[in-house]
Amino acid sequence: MKNHLLTTLPFGFLCFASSTTKAGAQESAQDSPTIATVSSIEEGLPYDKNGRLASYHLVFPAGDMAKNCPATRPDSAHYGFKRTALEGDALEFVFPNYDEDAPCMAACLERGAEASIAGYPMPQKRYNASDTTTDFDQWFAQKCSKVEVCLINYYDEEYALENYWVSPDGEPRLNQALKYGEKFTRCFLSFLGHKFIVKTTRDDSIIAKFTVEFPLILAFGTQPPHAQDIQEGQFDDEIRSSLKNEWKKQDVAKRTFSSLGFSKGRLPDDVFAAMGAFYYNNRDHKTREEWRGKGVFVNWWETDIFMIQVPWSLKDAWQKRLSNLVSEWAGVPVEQTVMYGMRQYEDGARLLTHVDRLKTHVVSLIVNIAQGNLSQDWPVEVFDHYGRLHEVVMEPGDIVYYESAKNLHSRNRPLMGENSYYTNLFTHYRPIGEGDDWYKEQTAAPGREPLLEVEGECHVPSEVVSKETEHLGYGRVRCDDPRLGKNIAPSLFVVKSGDDLIEWWERTTPEGSVAKMHDDDDGDGDGKIDEDYYDDDDDDEDSNDYYDGNDDDDFEPDPEKDEL
């Protein structure tokens, strides 16, 4: 089956103009060889209409220009970069430990970063000649100009696509073949400014051209939508059975790591700047998540769920920072098992109550990357060790730690708002050196024991007078026992059985949903826990199948020759 629809891309990513040489591409990207000097990151750098950094910037202390530092040379920045000297507040912001007598320093700021955090580069994006023996040009090429590109074929099911790198002399060189579908996504390393053409092997015609402007996830064609012949109540039995199974599964793990099973935190600014920039630059490159036949944990039959796959090199850089946060929260050293997403929920989306995989998803993070056009907050629901429901409202950059194989979690309330969207990243970890049986020993460190018995009552704000007004009480329920925190649900809902989970799902189902309410359930479920709970083969979430180890390093230019 052939699909001629091409993914809609921002201007400059998909075009059919004749190719230019690499030098020509670089020339057009640079406004001027002059160096701008700014004293404020938020006010001195150019931002687009959405308050995002409009280009990459190679920044350095203004005082280094007198030192003949390599960052200040006219040829020190390449395609997509502007060179900017920093002084005053901007210098202190980006280089807080700057010593004017020290050797050269530099940093690369991310295109697409939000203005308030644009001056927080990740550690690998910083250069300090006194701390490294790495040549500046090598550092810049490897840490700033080299990026990962991931491509997906939704154009033709029968015939593969072929991706060609266009060399500086205009000669196309075959890079890789792309089979159809998400599981055949292919990633490779390239450089900003590199040009590619994509052909179909059906007739060898060119179906797309693009230039690498940032770390990129790009699909060609549009995958077919899920079937629309869904009948009212079609998935009711499966949903009810799934909820009863999830109740059984949450009781398997006896080990706990925290008093409630979750807590709320915040990303470091540099990590959020990098994640937010990647999302912003690729926000128009989302693809429909393939859910049919994979269960009912998101309501894919009512609303589309989208994915923006994160390249492996970015995942690796982010995980090095996030795993330290999770280890500190859990009280034990952890190792990363899976990073999944970015998943974008849209208007009407719901997430059924569940726990995650026992062997690999022991403690986890939810990261909110972006959200918009919500008419009501869309809280993540976490049931603590006693079954009390907590509804946690997140803002972009917020994180929620949770014991994901033990504590039930969900978003049963529908995402509300015309053209609303909510984009999350999920990361999962397990304790280092404890093996697959980590969950069998019922232990908790002092001060981390499960909070079961509490004192006093919880008080709901007076504005909450019905279930339709419960959203007015998120984060405002006050409990006599402060150990319960600030996120007890305004409904004061508590679960003690699978039937209670079904009741919560029914209670939050909006009018007009294809879900049909029943009161004649026998309460038995299907009597077993699905096997993939114990399986560490996480092929429905994340896999490294789509990185083939191929990159265009075979064609890597010499940084000193300014060919990037």
Image: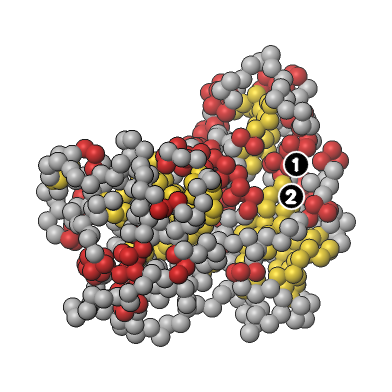
**Is residue 119 shown left or right of residue 523?**
right
Q: Position of residue 319 (x, y in %)?
A: 56, 45
Give the CA distance from mark 1 to mark 2.
8 Å
> Does residue 513 lie above or below 261 as drawn?
below
- Density class for disc 2 (Cα within 10 Å; few <14, some 14-19, many ≥20) is many
Residue designated by label 1: 141
**Relative to the observer, which residue lies in front, 322 or 24?**
322
Residue 53 visible, this angle: no
Q: Residue at x 31, y 35 (%)?
A: 447
**Is residue 19 shown left or right of residue 334?**
right
Label 1 with label 2: CB-CB less than 8 Å: yes
Q: Residue at x 76, y 56 (%)?
A: 551
Q: Quadrant of residue 468?
A: bottom left
> Does residue 554 lie above or below 503 as drawn?
above
Q: Residue furthest top?
A: 101
Residue 191's mark?
A: 2
